[in-house]
Image (cartoon, rainbow, N blue to C red):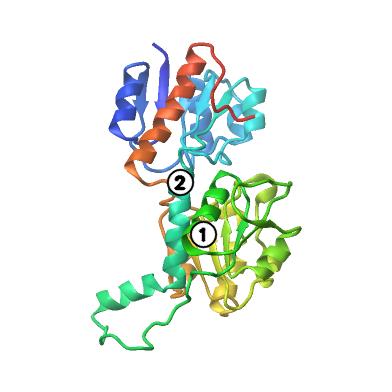
Amino acid sequence: MKKLLITRDLPQDVLDAARARFDVTLRESTEGLMPDEAAQALADYDAILPTLGDQFTADAFDGPVRAGVLGNFGVGYNHIDVAAATKAGVLVSNTPDVVTDATADIAMTLILSACRRAGEGERLLRSGMWLGWSPVQMLGTHVTGKRVGIVGMGRIGQAVARRCHYGFDMPVIYFNRSQKEVDVPARQVETLGALMSQADIIVVTVPGGGSNTNMIDAAAIAEMQENAFFINVARGDVVDEAALILALQERRIAGAGLDVYAREPLVPQELRDLENVVLLPHLGTAALEVRAAMGMMALENIIAWDEGKPLPQRVI
């Protein structure tokens, strides 16, 4: 029976299925593997089921490598140096599709919460300072009919577009580095700057890492309208966090809704101090059915490797 390391706790059904097939070691820590720990895991286990925060950097693959597969739990895999893994003979997979709707739902949660000041309202109520209803109390931004601009029109971006268009009658524009045909009424713009300047609500759904690091930089943020909202359900590293904080502090944009951060789980105090920001603790796929499906998909890829079959969701 091959040795499988699962780096973080998973839904019980996933653990039971894994233990029926492999000799499983389950880490108790909620913190990700550091590069030296990742290197040791690669030397000690036949297969690894890692997730966000496990630092499988290029250096981790420099030593002896026993593992043959990294069945990543999550669609994002910017914590894995895929080129180094491939060079070391380690296959990598991820879990697309099953995360799409849940992540798009969180994007809508952030849009509505930020625009309608839901977080501020709840804090006011819990503080005991609410004095009762008033015609001008906590006036926010009406979402229906606003133009949404989506950065990255992959599966999640298109799911957000469908919700915005069909659910809230929102015109949709999008920026994608390549030409992209989509199944929802939407207009592709030529540049990121054009999208940032035209949209009332900007939603970022691109993969993290690589050329997308700090894609939303100070110059891009400067293009936003004063009444615009910024929503990120992608990865924290796609945004220049310091530039975003400054724009929010100076009220150069109306607000933001964030589910991801540059140095998770560390969230800058400057962000936490702002009233015009809705902050969630990376809840994008945090639904039991979704997390179970993700775990099963990751496990299916590891089983395929064990049986000498192609990985269904291999990352190349």
122 with respect to 203 (left or right)? left
Q: Residues within 10 Å of mark 2 (few under 14, many from 20)?
A: some
Residue at the extreme left: 128
Identity, as a three-letter code, of the amino acid under mark 1: Cys
The residue wearing badge 2 is 101
Q: Which residue is nearer to you in this view: 119 or 197?
A: 197
* Vertical side of 46 occupied by 29: above or below: below
The residue wearing badge 1 is 164
* Vertical side of 1 occupied by 115: above or below: below
Distance between mark 2 and mark 1 Cα atoms: 13 Å
- What quarter of the picture does the C terminus occupy? top right
Identity, as a three-letter code, of the amino acid under mark 2: Asp
Q: Position of residue 122 (x, y in %)?
A: 31, 72
- Describe the element under mark 1 as helix, strand or loop: helix
Q: Position of residue 181 (x, y in %)?
A: 68, 46
Residue appearing at x 38%, y 47% in the figure = 286
Q: Position of residue 107 (x, y in %)?
A: 48, 57
Residue appearing at x 63%, y 34% in the figure = 58
Q: Which mark is residue 260?
A: none
Residue appearing at x 63%, y 22% in the figure = 88
Labels 2 and 1 touching (C-beta < 8 A): no
* Vertical side of 245 occupied by 80: above or below: above
Q: Position of residue 132 (x, y in %)?
A: 25, 86
* Sequence-wise first label, 2 or 1: 2
Q: Which residue is nearer to you in this view: 199 or 262?
A: 199
Q: Which residue is nearer to you in this view: 145 or 119?
A: 145
39 with respect to 193 (left or right)? left
Q: Which residue is nearer to you in this view: 8 or 58?
A: 8
193 with respect to 265 (left or right)? right
- What quarter of the picture does the N terminus occupy? top left
- Describe the element under mark 2 as helix, strand or loop: helix
Q: Is residue 275 visible?
A: yes
